[in-house]
């Protein structure tokens, strides 16, 4: 594949990842700050409850993408490594979302939340995911962006065998 097309795919993939990161930061940071409050931490310690893990995971995703972005900018990492890391992160986000809304029953299995948040989850796993995908457009759109990012970076893994250009 010619270099201009590869560069366009790299930019497109980066934009897709930035959209995903922005949504995860927008949703995760306020909730993370609530959990960072000493009173909230004390509550969970006293009650033996477990907080919703998503804010921590979402900010972890943001942090890893930020670190990878800095490494790319500084020329410290090869393109192939970045492509594979982005595939793993985006697949992880989609799979985590699917698990949260099906097997983990909105975290009832993990957290001290009640089962009220799981109403309307009768039926198949695929039906449940499709319902969430359609009824919560931000989630559905973000997952679609992440799936497209996986496809773009998978294409780049095959089309761009060259290591990153070293910056001097």
Image (cartoon, rainbow, N blue to C red):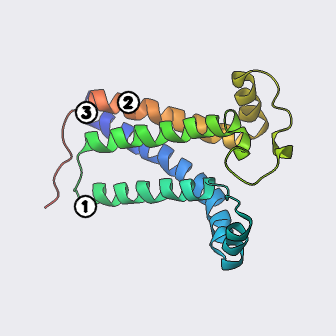
Label 2 SS:
helix
Write down the residue under mark 1. Answer: 74
The residue closer to the viewer here, 30 or 141, is 30
Q: Residue at x 43, y 46 (%)?
A: 14
Mark pair 3, 2: CA separation: 10 Å
Q: Residue at x 34, y 40 (%)?
A: 83
Instruction: Give neighbour class at mark 2: few <14, some 14-19, many 20+ (Cα, 10 Å).
Output: some
Instruction: Give neighbour class at mark 1: few <14, some 14-19, many 20+ (Cα, 10 Å).
Output: few
Label 1 SS:
loop
Write down the residue under mark 3. Answer: 160
Label 3 SS:
loop
Tag 3–tag 2 contact (CB < 8 Å)? no
Q: Which quarter of the image is occupied by the C terminus? A: bottom left
Identify the residue at the far bottom of this view.
38
Earlier along the polypeptide chain: callout 1 or callout 3?
Answer: 1
* Residue 4 x %, y %: 29, 37
Q: How many marks?
A: 3
> Residue 43 lies in what quarter of the image?
bottom right
* Residue 158 x %, y %: 29, 27
Earlier along the polypeptide chain: callout 1 or callout 2?
Answer: 1
* Residue 117 x %, y %: 82, 45
Asked if residue 75 lies left or right of residue 5, the reply is left
Give the answer, above or below, for where 157 lies relative to 67: above
Asked if residue 124 lies left or right of residue 92, the reply is right
- Would residue 93 be visible to someone looking at this image? yes
The residue closer to the viewer here, 20 or 7, is 20
Mark pair 1, 2: CA separation: 23 Å
Q: Which quarter of the image is occupied by the N terminus? A: top left
Q: Residue at x 32, y 41 (%)?
A: 7
Write down the residue under mark 2. Answer: 154
Give the answer, above or below, for where 84 lies relative to 77: above
């Amino acid at each position: 594949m010619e270099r201009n097309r590869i560069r366009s795919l790299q930019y497109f993939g980066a934009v897709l990842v930035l959209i995903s990161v922005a949504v995860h930061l927008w949703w995760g940071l306020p909730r993370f700050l609530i959990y960072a409050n000493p009173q909230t931490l004390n509550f969970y310690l006293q009650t033996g409850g477990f907080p919703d893990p998503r804010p921590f995971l979402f900010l972890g995703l943001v942090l890893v993408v930020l670190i990878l972005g800095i490494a790319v900018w500084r020329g410290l990492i090869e393109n192939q490594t970045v492509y594979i890391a982005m595939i793993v992160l985006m697949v992880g986000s989609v799979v985590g979302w699917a698990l949260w809304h099906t097997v983990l029953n909105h975290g009832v299995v993990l957290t001290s939340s009640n089962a009220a948040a799981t109403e309307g989850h009768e039926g198949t796993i695929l039906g449940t995911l499709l319902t969430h995908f359609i009824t919560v457009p931000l989630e559905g759109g973000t997952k679609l962006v992440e799936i497209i990012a996986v496809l773009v970076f998978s294409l780049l893994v095959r089309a761009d065998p060259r290591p990153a250009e070293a910056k001097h």
